[in-house]
Image (cartoon, rainbow, N blue to C red):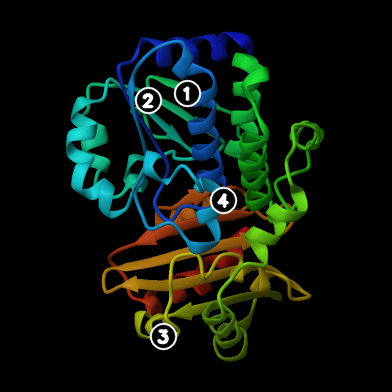
């Protein structure tokens, strides 16, 4: 990251008259933290310099434990149904599309093809290893903990004085979420320098931790108990222990599943002594299996996600969406091939 990148990004914003800023489906704290920070920064800084129509898009239902991140600003976002009603016109009218924490247009959901067809300038701000070729300008650093950390550096270069406590809270939440409370993807000193800056700017670290990790409804706790008691499996593969669990659509319905209920559940599967790789296989509907993969230390799980499930992500935290296989078939692929990562 350098001043030249920041200046170029600022020029793109100031030259646009219709802007779309979007994140991925199944949004996590990093996605929403980045988006909320960008929205607040635009109001604090860019809105004073020019007049543009701007849409902040969350193409999926926002989990209950993340609602607080856009509290008081809800009317500025298009979420799920609102997005589906207006998405086509918004993408057709846009002359600038900014994708954050989003490396592939497929992760925008049903409007991915509209993104691909758009003649707008396309900007990517992300920390994932792989991105599609559709972007005109990319701000990317795979060594940082999160898109939120990367965005803090970018915004600081544009106007550090425009970063207020609301932005600090959003970015801290993104970093906290994408590092599992600083348990992975945070081995660089720069991450902690950024966190220190966010604290100085007013980030409420205790409150944010409480809202992200101790703010689930009773039904989610029941689902967690069911996974740990009935569904979690340990298997020895070439003298290495791996874990996994599966959940069907029927099981999710029985526990009144809502988006966000399975956030961090896979960490319980990884936190078992002797287990260095864990996976979850969740049937979201009849055609979609959502896969999450986690690993410890130097075991790279993102290449495995790419090679066998056309997915990707970070070396220790990756995922995929599979539309042409059953739960049983996905588990079989995992168990037959996971020895490759050791």
**Residues under labels 4 and 2: Cα distance?**
24 Å
What kind of element bears circle 3? Answer: helix
Closer mark to the observer between disc 3 and disc 1: 3
Whether tag 3 and tag 1 are in contact, CB under 8 A, the answer is no
Residue, x 42% and y 46% (percent of image)? 74
x, y percentage for residue 128? 54, 39
| Residue on which disc 1 sits | 138
Instruction: Kindly identify which numbered label has been placed on residue 305.
Output: none
Residue at mark 4: 29
Q: Is residue 165 left or right of residue 20?
A: right
Disc with the residue nearer the chain's start (4 vs 2): 4
21 vs 33: above or below? above
Report how far apart the C-alphas of labels 1 and 2 lie in the structure. Answer: 7 Å
Depth check, mark 4 against mark 2: the one in front is: 4
Q: Secondary structure at mark 1?
A: strand
Question: What residue is disc 3 on?
Answer: 251
Sequence-first tag of 3 and 1: 1
Of tags 3 and 2, the one toward the viewer is 3
Q: Which numbered tag is attached to residue 135? A: 2
Residue 171 percent across, percent down from the top left: 63, 39
Give the percent coordinates (x, y) of residue 156: 65, 20
Rendered view: 112 above or below 28: above
First-in-chain label (4 vs 3): 4
C-alpha span from label 4 to label 3:
25 Å
Label 1 with label 2: CB-CB less than 8 Å? yes
Q: Are marks 4 and 2 in contact (CB under 8 Å)?
A: no
């Amino acid at each position: 990251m350098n001043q030249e990148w920041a200046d170029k990004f600022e020029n793109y914003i100031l030259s646009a008259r219709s802007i779309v800023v979007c994140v991925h489906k199944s949004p996590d704290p990093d996605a929403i933290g980045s988006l909320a920070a960008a929205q607040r920064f635009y109001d604090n800084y860019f809105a004073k310099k020019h007049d543009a129509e701007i849409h902040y898009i969350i193409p999926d239902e926002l989990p209950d434990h993340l609602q607080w991140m856009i509290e008081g600003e809800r009317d500025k976002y298009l979420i799920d149904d609102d997005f589906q009603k207006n998405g086509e016109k918004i993408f057709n009218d846009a002359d600038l599309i900014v994708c954050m924490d989003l490396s592939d247009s497929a992760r925008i959901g049903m409007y991915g093809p509209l993104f691909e067809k758009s003649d707008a300038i396309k900007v990517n701000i992300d920390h994932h290893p792989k991105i599609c070729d559709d972007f005109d300008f990319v701000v990317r650093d795979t060594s940082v903990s999160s898109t939120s950390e990367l965005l803090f550096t970018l915004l600081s270069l544009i106007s550090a004085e425009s970063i207020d406590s609301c932005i600090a809270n959003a970015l801290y939440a993104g970093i906290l979420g994408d590092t599992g409370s600083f348990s992975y993807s945070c081995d660089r000193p720069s991450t902690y320098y950024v966190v220190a800056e966010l604290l100085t700017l007013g980030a409420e670290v205790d409150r944010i931790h409480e809202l992200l990790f101790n703010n689930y409804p009773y039904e989610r706790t029941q689902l967690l108990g069911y996974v740990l008691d009935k569904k979690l499996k340990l298997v020895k593969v070439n003298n290495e222990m791996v874990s996994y669990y599966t959940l069907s659509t029927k099981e999710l319905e029985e526990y009144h599943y809502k988006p966000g209920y399975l956030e961090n559940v896979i960490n319980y599967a990884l936190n078992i002594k002797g287990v260095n790789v864990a996976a979850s296989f969740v049937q979201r509907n009849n055609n979609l299996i959502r896969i999450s993969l986690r690993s410890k230390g130097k075991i790279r799980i993102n290449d495995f996600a790419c090679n066998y499930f056309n997915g990707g992500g970070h070396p220790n935290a990756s995922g995929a969406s599979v539309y042409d296989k059953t739960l049983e078939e996905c588990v079989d692929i995992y168990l037959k091939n996971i020895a490759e990562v050791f």
